[in-house]
Image: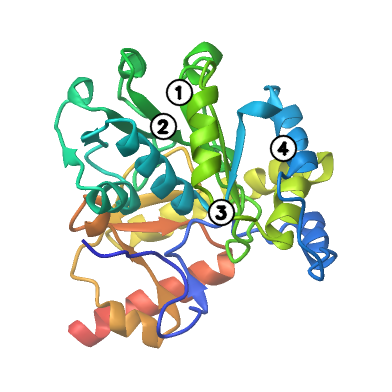
Amino acid sequence: MMREHGGTDANGVPRWDFSTNANACGPCPVVLESVRRADAAHYPDPRYTALREALALFHQVDFRRIVVGTSASELISRITACAFRAGARRFWQPALAYGDYALAAQAWRLHQVDDAEQADLVWLCEPSSPLGVAESQCVQAAVQGRTVVIDRAYEPLRLAGQCSFTRAELDAIWQLWSPNKAMGLTGVRGAYAIAPLQSATMVRELEDMAASWPLGAHGVAMLHAWTGVEAQQWLIWSRHRLSAWKQQQLSLLEQLGWECLPSVTNYFSATAPTPVDEDTLREHGVKLRDTRTLGLPGYWRLSVQSPEAQGALRAALIRRKERVT
């Protein structure tokens, strides 16, 4: 398996980037300003006391349940390693899923199983990726000593509906949060996990496995600002704008013959009427995300972008069509 992500690659930053799910309305001004003011001349508090308290207050949980990490991917790796040390040998993930769950399991030689009830480590994601819909997997797998993690990276970018998990169900599993997507600041790395109730032992083990200062000053600033009223108000405003942009983008693609799958997020998957030439699109500054590494070959995941970006996408697709014909 290979690590494959949207966004910047060896060809640089795409001018019109539909390949990453970052909030296209961002960066969030108040969070960006907080990052710029971060004290990069000194180490942050190695225990992240104030940050963990702010995150705990934001989520209304005990601060001892907060585990900070360099990124969601780093926490995925650390949780997998911790589960392996506790005896996990089998894992389950949705058929369509972020590749880092399987990559982390592969590093520790965990065997993938088809039934979540047969797994020691279970990965969930809601809203899911690449489809952007509710997670259908039952949370009964949370019992009987299994480690169950729900990736909530896209919850802040949910444009319709609400989480299908109850508060009691969420308190029984690990929650993984990476707000940099919602804040439009994916270049600032920082994430955290909310531990289940009665999981103090695994929290200590995860903290023992972390390197010193896993989160730098800029990541601390980003996560702390994300919990503030101004950032959350901006997020609400951005979701309204993204909803309007999404309808425009769906209409544009459908007019060009694309089949778009339903989603509740600022991204959706679609299939083109003719083969898509990534290189040709990139020549016109447009980058899309092929979903084959997410378990969905033949489709593309497109984030919702501004009308200007949509115009560039339309022009690139039409040029491609004209070149083929």
Q: Give the side of residue 65 with respect to residue 73, left or right.
A: right
Label 3 crowding class (10 Å Cα cut-off): few <14, some 14-19, many 20+?
some
Check disc 3 and report the residue beneath it: 245
In the displayed structure, does residue 81 sit left or right of residue 103? Answer: right
Q: Amino acid at mark 4?
A: Arg
Identify the disc placed on residue 52. 4
Among the two numbered marks 2 and 1 on one chain, the one whose residue lies closer to the N terminus: 2
Q: Residue 173's mark?
A: 1
Marks 3/1: CA distance? Answer: 34 Å
- Depth check, mark 3 against mark 1: the one in front is 1
Mark 2 is on which residue type?
A: Val
Q: Secondary structure at mark 3?
A: helix
Q: Please, what secondary structure does the residue beneath circle 1 have? A: loop
Q: Which numbered disc flags the more N-terminal residue, 1 or 4?
A: 4
Q: Nearer the viewer, residue 117 or 323?
A: 117
Instruction: Compare marks 2 and 3 and give the one earlier in the sequence.
Output: 2
> In what quadrant of the picture does the N terminus appear?
bottom left
- What percent of the width, then of the height, locates residue 126? 43, 34
Q: List the residue tagged with mark 2.
A: 149
Mark sitting earlier along the chain (4/3): 4
- The amino acid type, in three-letter code, at marker 1 is Ile
Marks 3 and 1 in Cβ contact (< 8 Å) = no
Disc 4 and disc 3: Cα gap in Å? 35 Å
x 44%, y 36%: residue: 127
Label 4 Cα neighbours within 10 Å, binned few <14 / some 14-19 / many ≥20: many
Instruction: Give the mark, 3 or 1, whose residue is nearer the N terminus.
Output: 1
- On screen, residue 243 above or below 183: above
Report the amino acid beneath label 3: Trp
